[in-house]
Amino acid sequence: MLLCLTANHRNASFDLLEKLSFGSPDAARTLVATSPAVSGAVVLSTCNRFEAYLEVDDAVAATDDTVQIMTAASGVEADALRSVVTVLSDDDVIRHLFAVSSGLESVVVGEDEISGQVRRSLERARAAGTTSSGLERLFQHATRTSRGVKANTAIGGAGRSLVRLALELASSRVADWSQTRVLIVGTGQYAATTVAALRDRGVTSASVFSPSGRAAAFAVKQGLRAETVLTDAIADADIVITCTSTLAIGTANIPDSSRRLLIDLGLPRNVDAAVAHLDGVELLDLETISLHAPIEEVTATADARALIGAEAANFSADQLAEPAIVALRTHIFELLDAEIERARSRGDSTPQTEAALRHLAGVLLHQPSVRARELARDGRTEEFTAGIDALFGIRSAIVTEIGDAESASA
């Protein structure tokens, strides 16, 4: 079954999310390696959410193991973590991920960055060897759904992002963006988004500093100035925008009391809270920015959620049909393999003939597979399973199980 443990800006403080983000990099690998209840895990950690998507055999054991591992990795007490984490299962997981990847659960509804973050979380799970076939299908369908939402509803308006909201809030402090010197700290996707947003506002003087040494390459690609000394770079900037995971700016990095705005988009925090108490410094952090998030457009959001609901229902139906389809394909290809082996033993088989027969089997199985999914979406999976039992004598435990599952949900 599918399980999701989510702590996000709706149910957890940014302080707690910051602590969880420290422990997130190795959480999926540890969970799959140590928990007998978990067969697959994908962890999504962004500036406003920590979520563990799991394929499990035992929901209770998997939840307990996840809480224990995240407690050890982040230092958040188990009771505190349980008090804010929402646990979702099966169809609720599907709808939630589809909504998250489409930007409906973000601080800025419809934001541009989240779909890429969801995609990269799956890529990291693949690299770590922690994903599973069920999670692969779920995340790939979520990516397609987010594209559909952006293409077919007004929720995906151009330029929606946390960066742009932060700059909107900063506008009341800026007399002329074209005369404003901006320093970007970080070279990841958020930094690239920040460059685009700054140029849309007319910024012409921008530089970049990277604690990991990638500033020069990023500067060439984006047409910026590369900085090598952080304190000097801050001294030359009117606005500093941080979006990195490897640096914390402290009071010692602020060179003087010149009027200066720091925008901290990092999680964990990139700017020490004590910096806000320095003369001349104003700090906008994620918590402050989130308080000014615009209200959702009701019609656009309703349209997006309707589309997501339909896609989630289709995905659930496909999951119901899959075991029956697999059983039928296995049966047909086992028969084909046996016949090919007999032909080989008589010397009557060639590679070309075998390839043609396998292609023919695939063609013949295509329409039954399509029909199985159509019937599943109408709540009629049992008809398909009964049909292949009647025709081929397939009595798979998986097919029986899926028929029982559909009956239980009817």
Image (cartoon, rainbow, N blue to C red):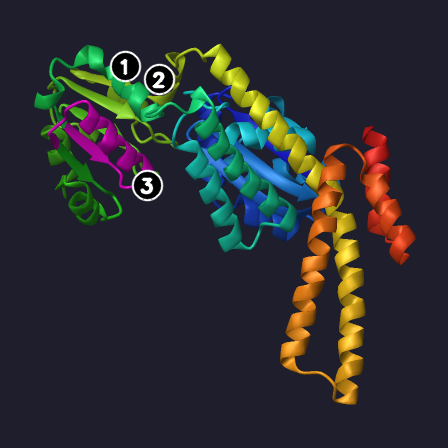
Disc 2, SS: helix
Q: Are marks 1 and 2 in contact (CB under 8 Å)?
A: yes
Position above or below: 375 against 212: above
Q: Nearer the viewer, mark 3 or mark 2?
A: 2
Say what amino acid the circle numbered 1 marks: Leu
* Closest to the observer, 62 or 338: 338
Q: Is residue 27 left or right of residue 295?
A: right
Q: Is residue 302 left or right of residue 338?
A: left
* Magenta stretch holds residue 189: yes
Q: Which residue is mark 1?
A: 169
Residue 289, numbered circle: 2
Q: Residue at x 80, y 61 (%)?
A: 331
Q: Nearer the viewer, mark 3 or mark 1?
A: 1
Please state the extent of the stretch shown in magenta in the rendering: 182-205
Name which of mark 1 and mark 2 comes first in the sequence: 1
Say what amino acid the circle numbered 3 marks: Thr
* Magenta stretch holds residue 59: no
Q: Are marks 3 and 1 in contact (CB under 8 Å)?
A: no
* Closest to the observer, 329 or 200: 329
Q: Which residue is mark 3?
A: 246
Q: Position of residue 399 (x, y in %)?
A: 83, 48
Q: Splitting the image into 4 quarters, where does residue 306 fall?
A: top right
* Closest to the observer, 144 or 272: 144
Q: Is residue 194 left or right of residue 160?
A: left
Disc 3, SS: loop
Q: Residue at x 10, y 22 (%)?
A: 178
Q: Residue at x 71, y 63 (%)?
A: 361
Name which of mark 3 and mark 1 comes first in the sequence: 1
